[in-house]
Amino acid sequence: MPFAFVQHLKNKRIILASGSPRRREILSRLGLNFDIVPSKFPETLDKAKYAPSEYAIANATEKGLEVYGRLAQEDQEVDIVIAADTIVSIDDDILEKPKDAEDALRMLKRLSGRSHRVYTGVAFIYSLREPIHPGYNIVSFTEETEVMFRECNEDDLKVYIETGEPMDKAGAYGYQAFGSFFVEKINGCYYNVVGLPIKVFIELEKLVKKQEFNCVTKDLQNNY
Amino acid sequence: MPFAFVQHLKNKRIILASGSPRRREILSRLGLNFDIVPSKFPETLDKAKYAPSEYAIANATEKGLEVYGRLAQEDQEVDIVIAADTIVSIDDDILEKPKDAEDALRMLKRLSGRSHRVYTGVAFIYSLREPIHPGYNIVSFTEETEVMFRECNEDDLKVYIETGEPMDKAGAYGYQAFGSFFVEKINGCYYNVVGLPIKVFIELEKLVKKQEFNCVTKDLQNNY
């Protein structure tokens, strides 16, 4: 039997707007059922206009709205779309996925022996119980984790880049796999570094208790 | 191609003295080859005599020595035995695996809304290049991670205990699975909480560079 809020979401259509297998694994771990519809939002926002955490939230929101809008156009029923964007920030610069092996090496050398911050922005786009225009609401939040890198030997970094692991990861490393060798410690939520913070469940639980959210019948809500 | 120190350990007989699937997964992630020989050490040390981190190291050392001695008696060739012990410490008390569901609930309620410390003690028992009595040496170390729990709802804790997950875990939770729902943040090495810190690789790398260690030919050592 899952946690109460997971049970309340049982027969609802939840969409994860991300193709990341890591996000899928995290979101499914408490027994939540959902479909995957990766966002087609091109991530073209101007980084210079945002603080790093705001940039991650803005990207997540755009990704979620793109998927919500697309499914609405297809007349699909959707209760909630969950979208996320993870970035690495160092010296107020934003590091996303590396362009190529050279870019990955540059990023990793920059992270070596120092601490940086990982932000995941998360956005929920959820349908309202009462159909007030535009019929949905947005909840967004961010989680920050500090990550301390060891001093890295360049040969080891090159071996690491050859594994291919850095290429689809913000900041060019994965703490959940080989990249863990370079990380001395973290301060914050581990899952945030992997791509989806545990806070996503805490916020889903709050949402389940909201009157405006169409996911919960009055009956369930009174018993909650 | 693995990291240099992993290559240097390639044809050596490494033993993990633990049956924990989590430790096996962590130790194998950099491509290290090893055999598993779970320790039969009964963990009967008197907790009152040790500080929590020392208790974890003492247990790890006893586990490693038991396996090293057993294999030596069987005339098996062994280059290094790696043993570990993970405990949870709160208010200077040591929490190990819960005895039953009631014990698990008591532990989890005690952790709720507060921070505690997780210590993993690790011991390497390794054969010496020169056969000086007793033929082996011991390197041991500990890693500490602070874990902050959210305020937990007793119903959720009961649901969690029903999953069975707490029963084989120090402190009655697993941050790598369902138990992550209760953890707000950590400060330190994530893998230490799971059962084997990344420091194990850093210390193995140091060991490979030691002259007394029989794992490395002089030739390799000069090139390292």
Image (spheres, coloured by chain):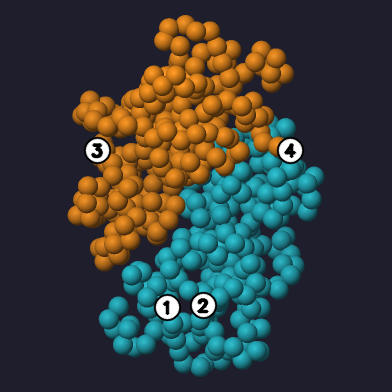
Chain colours: A cyan, B orange
Residue that carries the numbered disc 1 in the rendered image: A9
**Marks 4 and 1, the one that precedes in the sequence:** 1
Query: In the rendered structure, are the residues bearing label 3 and label 2 in contact, judged by CB atoms less than 8 Å apart?
Result: no
CA gap, disc 4 and disc 1: 45 Å
Residue B197 position (above or below residue B148): above
CA gap, disc 4 and disc 2: 40 Å
| B99 sits to left or right of B35 | left
Residue A60 rendering spot, x and y as whole percentages: 61, 68
User: 10 Å neighbourhood of mark 3: few (<14), some, or many (≥20)?
Assistant: few
| Number of the front mark, 4 or 3 | 4
Are the residues flagged by discs 4 and 3 from a single subunit? no
Q: Secondary structure at mark 1?
A: loop
User: 10 Å neighbourhood of mark 1: few (<14), some, or many (≥20)?
Assistant: some
Query: In the rendered structure, are the residues bearing label 4 and label 2 in contact, judged by CB atoms less than 8 Å apart?
Result: no
| B182 sits to left or right of B79 | left
Residue A76 rendering spot, x and y as whole percentages: 59, 88
CA gap, disc 1 and disc 3: 39 Å
**Marks 1 and 2, the one that precedes in the sequence:** 1
Residue A65 rendering spot, x and y as whole percentages: 63, 78
Q: Is residue B199 visible?
A: no
State which quarter of the image contains the N terminus of chain B.
top right
Q: Which residue is at 27% across, 32% downward?
A: B42
Residue A14, which numbered label? 2
Residue that carries the numbered disc 3 in the rendered image: B93
